[in-house]
């Protein structure tokens, strides 16, 4: 075997695949089975298309798990029975996979949606933008800790209230979203992580740093401009280099009724110079935000 088993095992874990149960040693047949499993693991881990197509993902995972010694029967469905909700049981492997693509300098242009579902434009829309960005403000219990912890806690409350009132929700991820899962003594972080997980279980999930592309996707795909309102939560909304501010301004340009959570900070540890809906301020882009 030319490939390192520990590396392939780590890829499988990152992708949420079942672990390989056979020993790859002890015979040519076992070696070939391991090789076939490794091929499938690498195929899943390096192909963004698999992560954005529910049926392709299910088929690929089922094949990989079978070679790993965990065969799974295809779910039985009656001829007239609709497909189950087009979502996976665990979205965090999706976020890890796209984070790996980005760190390895793979091209991920625009927005990469995972869940393709019908949008109900008569309902408000909540967009949680790059929520993991806020974790940096908790670092080493520094001067920004308390204000960041409170903002995360209160944003979680805002999100839960909107969900309880029937709003639809979008979680727009970047690689920092994974930081929400880090061990933390911060109650605010834990509350926000739970709110994001609930949103991922019930709403739309996508990956994207390009705010211009995100704005187009929200308008064209989810009918943002036809909604009663769009509430923004998550990362910073400073007039300079605030991704949430950029997205809000773009949505307003397309005719959306934009609101922003009172608990979205302008920048790390500060609410000063925050963009507000309806203002004349034009948010300034930073690297990776598009525009």
Image (cartoon, grey):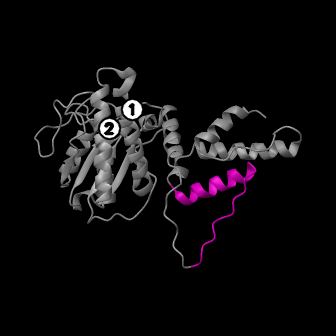
Tell me if 204 is positioned left or right of 151 in this view.
right
Q: Secondary structure at mark 1?
A: loop
Q: From what the image shows, is residue 147 above or below residue 255?
A: above
Q: Residues within 10 Å of mark 1 (few under 14, many from 20)?
A: some
On the image, the x and y values in percent for residue 173 come to: 40, 43
Is residue 266 shown in magenta? no
Q: Quadrant of the C terminus?
A: top left
Which residue is the extreme one toward the right? 27
Task: Please name the residue shown 34% across and 54% down the image.
Answer: 169
Name of the residue lying farthest toward the bottom: 80
- The correct choice, above or below, for 266 with respect to 213 in the image is above
Quarter the N terminus occupies: top right
User: Which image quadrant for residue 288?
Assistant: top left
Report crowding for label 2: few under 14, some 14 to 19, many 20 or more residues within 10 A (C-alpha): many
Q: Which residue is mark 2?
A: 152
Q: Earlier in the sequence, mark 1 or mark 2?
A: 2
Q: Which percent across, then down, holds residue 71?
A: 72, 56
Residue at horizontal 89 percent and vertical 39 percent from the top: 26
Q: Residue at x 36, y 33 (%)?
A: 133
- Cα distance between the residues tagged 1 and 2: 9 Å
Name the residue located 29 percent from the left edge and 28 percent from the top edge.
146
Q: Which mark is residue 150?
A: none
From the top left corner, tell me how far across and down residue 241 is, in percent. Answer: 25, 31
Using residue 165 as the reference point, say whether residue 100 is left or right of it.
Answer: right
Left or right of residue 174, residue 84 in this image:
right
In contact (CB < 8 Å): disc 1 and disc 2 = yes
Question: Which residues fall within the magenta stretch?
Answer: 53-79
């Amino acid at each position: 075997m030319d490939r390192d088993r520990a590396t392939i095992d780590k890829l499988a874990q990152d992708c949420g695949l079942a672990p390989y149960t056979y020993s790859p040693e002890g015979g040519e047949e076992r070696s070939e089975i391991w090789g076939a499993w490794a091929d499938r693991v690498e195929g899943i881990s390096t192909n963004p298309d698999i992560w954005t197509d529910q049926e392709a993902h299910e088929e690929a995972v089922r094949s990989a798990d079978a070679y790993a010694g965990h065969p799974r029967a295809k779910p039985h469905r009656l001829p007239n029975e609709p497909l189950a909700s087009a979502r996976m049981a665990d979205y965090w492997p999706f976020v890890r996979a796209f984070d790996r693509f980005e760190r390895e300098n793979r091209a991920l242009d625009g927005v990469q949606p995972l869940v393709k579902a019908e949008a109900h434009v008569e309902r408000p829309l909540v967009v949680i933008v790059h929520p993991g960005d806020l974790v940096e403000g908790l670092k080493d219990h520094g001067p920004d800790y308390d204000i960041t912890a409170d903002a995360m806690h209160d944003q979680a409350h805002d999100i839960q209230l909107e969900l309880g009132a029937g709003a639809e929700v979008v979680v727009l991820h970047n690689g920092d979203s994974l930081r929400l899962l880090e061990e933390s003594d911060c109650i605010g972080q834990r509350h926000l992580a739970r709110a994001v997980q609930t949103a991922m279980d019930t709403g739309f999930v996508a990956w994207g740093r390009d705010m211009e592309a995100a704005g187009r996707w929200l308008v064209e795909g989810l009918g943002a401009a036809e909604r009663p309102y769009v509430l923004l939560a998550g990362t910073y909304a400073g007039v300079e280099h605030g991704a949430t501010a950029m997205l809000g301004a773009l949505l307003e340009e397309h005719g959306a009724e934009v609101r922003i959570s009172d608990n979205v900070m302008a920048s790390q540890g500060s609410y000063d110079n925050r963009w507000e809906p309806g203002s004349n301020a034009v948010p300034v882009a930073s690297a990776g935000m598009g525009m």
